[in-house]
Amino acid sequence: MIQLSGKPLITEAEIRARIGQMVIEIARDLQRQELLIIGILRGSFMFTADIVRVLYNNDMHPLIDFVFVTSYAGMESTGEMKLLREPSLNVEGRWVLIVDDILDTGRTMKYAQDFIKERGAEEVRSCVLLDKPGRRLVDVHADYVGFSIDDVFVVGYGLDYEGRYRDLPYLGVLEDHPAA
Ligand code: IMP
Ligand code: MG
């Protein structure tokens, strides 16, 4: 039986504090540029919104867009990437910050970086809340990483399991318990 662990892996307060630190880094590196943030739907919706709010408090006012990339069925990546929504803003000549929830095999981020570069962005940086370095199948790098975690299946704060748990304000672990 698949069950949400009783104890958060990362609490709401820990997420908030880490985003504050990440935005300081982003502002230090990128403040002079007009930034275009491209969030990868659906998993990054909460993280992107929180980053943008903290950027605002650091006097950064990026353009914001979303793309919809999908590859996942259940708890395993299928490896096949699909772009279900093009960016609506032109990325040509822009400094783009791609925001995603988690770097797992790396396929999604690699795919996003490639198509944004192909469309002529001047600079492409990447920001993820979570990184599972042990799961990487594609050579890809994120410039800003919130938390590195072990190979566990996490939900909450935008991340789902079959559409559920995205609304949790914290990150929890899904555990697979053998039926009693
Ligand atoms: P990648 O392409 O394998 O790096 O996977 C990235 C996508 O897989 C993320 O944007 C998530 O939507 C999903 N994913 C990977 N690991 C998890 C997890 O532990 N929980 C929920 N979704 C995950
Ligand atoms: Mg996702």
Image (spheres, rainbow, N blue to C red):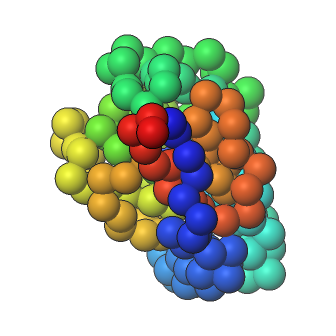
Q: Residue at x 73, y 27 (%)?
A: 88
- Establish if 12 lies above or below 95: below
From the viewer's side, name the closer residue of 68 and 162.
162
Q: Residue at x 69, y 37 (%)?
A: 164
Q: Can you see residue 51?
A: yes
- Establish if 93 lies above or below 61: above
Query: Where's ligand 1: which quadrant?
Result: top left
Q: Can you see residue 23?
A: no
Residue 142 place in picture, x, y as percent: 36, 56
Residue 20 place in picture, x, y as percent: 63, 82
From the viewer's side, name the closer residue of 78 and 56.
78
Q: Residue at x 62, y 16 (%)?
A: 84
Q: Is residue 125 left or right of residue 57?
A: left
State the image quarter where residue 85 is shown: top right
State the image quarter where residue 160 is shown: top right
Residue that protrudes farthest toward the front in the picture: 180
Q: Residue at x 59, y 65 (%)?
A: 6
Q: Is residue 180 left or right of residue 16?
A: left
Quadrant into which the C terminus falls = top left
Residue 125 place in picture, x, y as percent: 44, 55
